[in-house]
């Protein structure tokens, strides 16, 4: 199972059991998230952080919610079988990501 971990700071073993490290590919920012999926296709599982630090200009970087929105609104991918977890420490943003993805998955799976 192909798994993707989006987080600017954490390592896999900070969120999951260390025995799972080899199952994940790590991307550290929004641009790498999009590039990874365009190159490798949709993983079966994505673990989302929300706050992804600053970009190269010192501005707040696009976050995990932006990555989730890209999946839903721009990627054109079939997300019906996507499994995900939000491991963000930001409770409001974590709920935004979960809400967006769960509502979208519910919508497309009921078509």
Image (cartoon, rainbow, N blue to C red):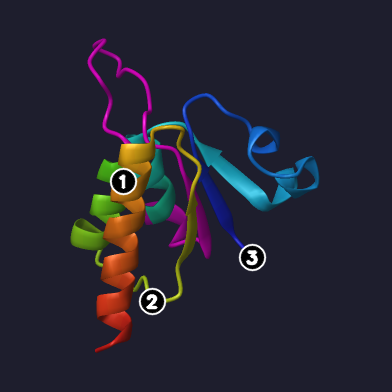
Q: Position of residue 55 (x, y in %)?
A: 30, 19
Give the CA distance from mark 1 to mark 3: 21 Å
SS at mark 3? loop
Give the magenta range: 38-63
Asked which secondary structure carries label 2, the reply is: loop
Left-right relation of 17 to 109: right
Q: Is residue 58 magenta?
A: yes
Left or right side of 76 for 88 = right
Disc sitting over residue 80 in the figure: 2
Mark 2 and mark 1 lie on one chain; the one further toward the N terminus is 1
**Secondary structure, magenta segment, majority class:** loop
Residue at the farthest right position: 19
> In the picture shown, does residue 79 fall above or below 19?
below
Residue 77 in sight in this render: no
Q: Residue at x 27, y 69 (%)?
A: 104
The residue at which mark 3 appears reads as 1
Name the spot of residue 34 as percent of width and height, x first.
34, 46
Furthest-left residue in this view: 73
Mark 3 or mark 2, which is nearer to you? 2
User: If you read the primary sequence from the N terminus, does the residue marked by circle 3 or circle 2 appear first?
Assistant: 3
Q: Residues within 10 Å of mark 1 (few under 14, many from 20)?
A: many
Task: From the viewer's perspective, tell me whether residue 5 is left or right of residue 56.
Answer: right
Q: Quadrant of the N terminus?
A: bottom right
* Gap in angstroms between the C-alphas marked 2 and 1: 17 Å
- Element type at marker 1? helix
Number of marks in the rendered image:
3
Q: Which mark is residue 67?
A: 1
- Whether residue 15 is visible to the viewer of this picture, yes or no, is yes
The spot of residue 2 in percent (x, y) is: 59, 60
């Amino acid at each position: 199972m192909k798994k993707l971990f989006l987080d600017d700071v954490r390592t896999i073993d900070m969120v999951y059991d260390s025995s799972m490290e080899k199952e994940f590919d790590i991307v550290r920012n929004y641009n790498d998230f999009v590039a990874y999926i365009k190159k490798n296709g949709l993983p079966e599982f994505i673990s989302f952080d929300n706050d992804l630090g600053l970009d190269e200009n010192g501005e707040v970087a696009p976050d995990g919610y932006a990555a989730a929105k890209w999946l839903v609104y721009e990627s054109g991918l079939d997300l019906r079988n996507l499994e995900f977890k939000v491991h963000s420490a930001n409770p409001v943003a974590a709920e935004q990501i979960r809400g967006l993805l769960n509502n979208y998955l519910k919508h497309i799976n009921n078509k």
